[in-house]
Amino acid sequence: MNASLYVFYDGACPLCTRTARLLQKLDWRRRLVVLSFRTPGVIEAYGLDPAKAEARLQVQAAGRTLEGIAALEAITARLPLLWPLWPWIVLARRLGIGDPIYDWVARHRWFWGQRSDCTGTCDPILRPAPPGDR
């Protein structure tokens, strides 16, 4: 198994940024390379689809790109402290409920990532969920 998993997160999203920092702290074996897809040149250098990167977490390993719940499965498989979550993520993916749950959270990530002391103007990129997803 390739030692490095490249994790591409949304660096403009507060929830995604906090999650990326947490993953880096939990990665004491240095199995992850965590990058914001919004960093200039990352999309091109790694051949990411910008629309897919905007919608879902992307990971790359061994020439394959995974997204959504499959990306979370790959991450938890590499971080021993997250191993207790791995079977639940695999089960959710196999039952077909993992991606719908992941997609719902991803569509609402701007709400979930908002700080409790924020009045909605803390981040100029902070935006509400699209109509119909509330």
Image (cartoon, rainbow, N blue to C red):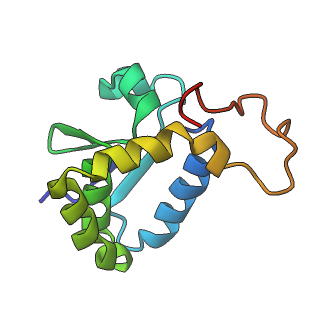
63 horizontally vs 119: left or right: left
Residue 59 x %, y %: 31, 44
Residue name at image x 66 percent, y 45 percent: 111
Whether residue 115 sits left or right of residue 76 in the image: it is: right
Q: Which percent across, then down, holds residue 57?
A: 39, 42
In the rendered image, the quadrant that contains the N terminus is bottom left
In front here: 74 or 32? 74
Q: Position of residue 41 (x, y in %)?
A: 46, 22
**Drawn side of residue 78 relative to residue 12, left or right:** left
Whether residue 35 can be seen here: no
Inspect this view and state whether residue 34 appears: yes
Residue 114 drawn above or below residue 44: below
Residue 24 vertical position relative to residue 37 in the rendered view, above or below: below
- Residue pictured at 71% horizontal, 29% vertical: 125
User: Which residue does the image show at 32% across and 73% down from the upper left?
Assistant: 85
> Where is residue 16 shown, x and y percent of the image?
55, 48
Taking 89 as reference, is 119 left or right? right
- Res 39 quadrant in image: top right
Along the line of sight, which residue is nearer the eye, 115 or 3?
115
103 vs 38: above or below:
below
The quadrant in which residue 89 appears is bottom left
Farthest residue, direction left: 1
Tally of numbered tags: 0
Q: What is the quadrant of the C terminus in the image? A: top right
Identify the residue at image location x=49%, y=62%: 24
